Image: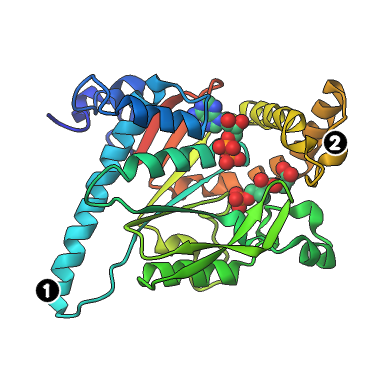
Amino acid sequence: MALLCLESECTMNTYSPYYTFDRKDWKAAQEDSKLPLTEEEFERLKGLNEKISLREVRDIYLPLTRLIHLYVSAFQQLQEKMNTFTGIRAPKSPYIIGIAGSVAVGKSTTARLLQTLLSRWQEHPRVDLVTTDGFLYPNRVLEEKGIMNKKGFPESYDIKKLMQFISSVKSGQPALKAPVYSHLAYDILADEEQLIDQPDILILEGINVLQVNTEAPVFISDFFDFSIYIDAEEQDIRSWYIERYQLLRDTAFQDPRSYFHKFASLSEEEAVQNASEIWRSINLKNLMENILPTKARAKLILKKGPDHQIQQVLLRK
Ligand SMILES: Nc1ncnc2c1ncn2[C@@H]1O[C@H](COP(=O)(O)OP(=O)(O)O)[C@@H](O)[C@H]1O
Ligand SMILES: CC(C)(COP(=O)(O)O)[C@@H](O)C(=O)NCCC(=O)O
């Protein structure tokens, strides 16, 4: 059975650079209607984010991982052929997937979902996930630079360090270490590292991964084999940001170690006001100036509706 619908069945403009699928077309990409996930596996996925619906996993994310699996298999076969052609037994180079989009659009949920689903294939069981927040400058440096209110903007990242890291991963280097950011501490954790040791697939997730800089000779995305931009209407993302902030106020902010502990006792109304202000002055500005302009650079765009359901999938030809 065809994995993707025929051109005539798809909502497709023949001369668009994208194949455009609505939910129905995308769903048709499934091999059969039953979910090839065990109860236990689905429970594990629910553990990633209890708001994810089984229907969404079955209709959208499973077909998506099947598609990515095709790309990874082709990549792995090409690597083997190249090794035969060159006679060089080069270290195995991981398949790298970038996931971009606004703060609060659902990048980390999607990344964790894809990590879990992609690792079910025996051809690529080792799927690592790195988030670019680990490459933010520590608060001390951001304060010195006077850009504490610019967290997430291009200048707040140690981009050289991120370039060095992604280039080493792609070269197949073993035992690499990625720095770790804590949302609780709102800072880099100086005494923690994430070990990345020649995975089959590396997912790099972050608001900045498709950004380009006219002064740099190479960009992060030059190392990507596949890239995804998660898209949604601004007012929807804004309300997801505020909802998440309210949830954090009731949970993580209650922890005295939390950077935002001072906001734990805010009233409902004050919390909404505070979150709206952070959204307006930092995250919305960053979305408009630096994130949204990178959308067209992605291989695949997932367009979400107000309930987080994917309404449209655009795949670059
Ligand atoms: N597929 C989804 N279904 C339901 N809720 C979701 C989904 N993806 C994300 N969310 C919710 O949206 C908010 C932002 O998601 P998150 O993955 O943390 O975003 P990001 O990593 O882009 O900041 C969270 O509250 C999360 O629970
Ligand atoms: C840490 C972030 C910059 C996201 O980083 P990413 O992993 O996408 O590189 C963002 O979640 C953030 O904290 N922004 C600052 C404004 C705010 O507190 O929402």
**Pair 2/1: label in front:** 2
As displayed, is residue 311 above or below residue 227? Answer: above
User: Which residue is more in the foreground, 215 or 178?
Assistant: 178
In the figure, residue 67 lies in which quadrant? top left
Identified at 65% across, 43% down, the residue is: 288
Q: Position of residue 297 (x, y in %)?
A: 45, 50
Task: Residue 139: give x, y in percent of width and height.
Answer: 77, 60
The image quadrant that residue 244 belongs to is top right
- Mark 2 sits on what residue? 263
Q: Horizontal placement of 139 versus 86: left or right?
A: right
- Which amino acid type is shown beneath numbered disc 1? Thr
**Secondary structure state at the residue bearing disc 1:** helix
Can you tell which quarter of the image residue 300 is in? top left
Residue at figure coordinates x 72%, y 56% from the top left: 187
- Nearer-the-camera pick, 233 or 110: 110
178 or 210: nearer the eye?
178
Q: Which mark is residue 84?
A: 1
Query: Would you say residue 286 is visible in this rendering?
Result: no
Name the residue at the bottom extreme: 87
Q: Nearer the viewer, residue 57 or 212?
A: 57
Q: Which residue shows up at 24% across the image and 20% down it?
A: 34
Residue at (16% x, 66% y) in the render: 80
Amino acid type, mark 2: Phe
* Nearest to N terminus: mark 2 or mark 1: 1
Beta carbon of the mark 2 residue lies under 8 A of ligand 2? no
Ligand 1: quadrant of the figure:
top right
